[in-house]
Amino acid sequence: MFKRLLSSALIFGMAAIAPPAVAASCAPRDGVVERLQQAYSESLSAGGLQKSQPVDTVVEVWSSTETGSFTVLVTHPSGISCIVASGQHYFEVATPAVLPGLPG
């Protein structure tokens, strides 16, 4: 639960403060996804629907455990995806186990 909450907060927080994407970082989603898979060995890690004006967008995090790279995409209803963030040293936060009888 904590992992999902943290991932969601990270995704939506980054999307909310990201500068507007320039045309050079936008392309049809199929092409962007193909490039992420082939060139960077990335796969879809997390995503969600962002309520925005005038249209809703989909925010996705693509990452690779092989290379440690990650990419954040915002996809518009038109099918155009824009890269709003990318980087190295991607990691996931493990949810600590709750032991029976102990307060969580």
Image (cartoon, rainbow, N blue to C red):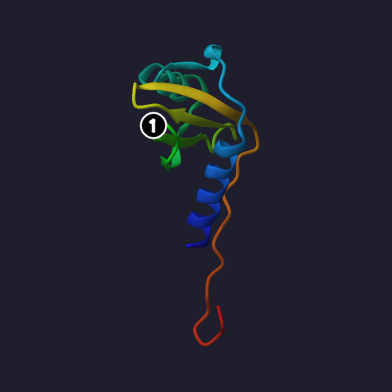
The answer to whether residue 14 is above or below residue 23 is below
Secondary structure category for the residue under label 1: loop
Q: Which residue is mark 1?
A: 55
Taking depth in this image into account, of 44 and 39 the one nearest to the observer is: 44
| Amino acid on which the number 1 mark rests in the picture | Val
Residue 43: give x, y in percent of width and height: 44, 34
Number of labels in the image equals 1
The answer to whether residue 57 is above or below residue 99 is above
Task: Classify the position of the C terminus by image quarter.
Answer: bottom right
Residue lying furthest bottom: 101
Residue 28: give x, y in percent of width and height: 39, 16
For label 1, count other residues whose C-alpha is less than 10 Å away and answer few (under 14), some (14-19) or many (20+). Answer: few
Q: Indicate left or right for 40 with 51 as reference.
A: right
Residue lying furthest front: 54
Q: Residue at x 48, y 55 (%)?
A: 4
Residue 37: give x, y in percent of width and height: 44, 25
The answer to whether residue 11 is above or below residue 32 is below
- For residue 30, which quarter of the picture? top left
Q: Residue at x 53, y 24 (%)?
A: 83
Q: Indicate left or right for 75 with 6 as reference.
A: left
Q: Residue at x 57, y 46 (%)?
A: 10
Taking depth in this image into account, of 10 and 103 the one nearest to the observer is: 10
- For residue 17, which quarter of the picture? top right
Q: Residue at x 39, y 35 (%)?
A: 56
Residue lying furthest top: 24
Residue 57: give x, y in percent of width and height: 41, 33
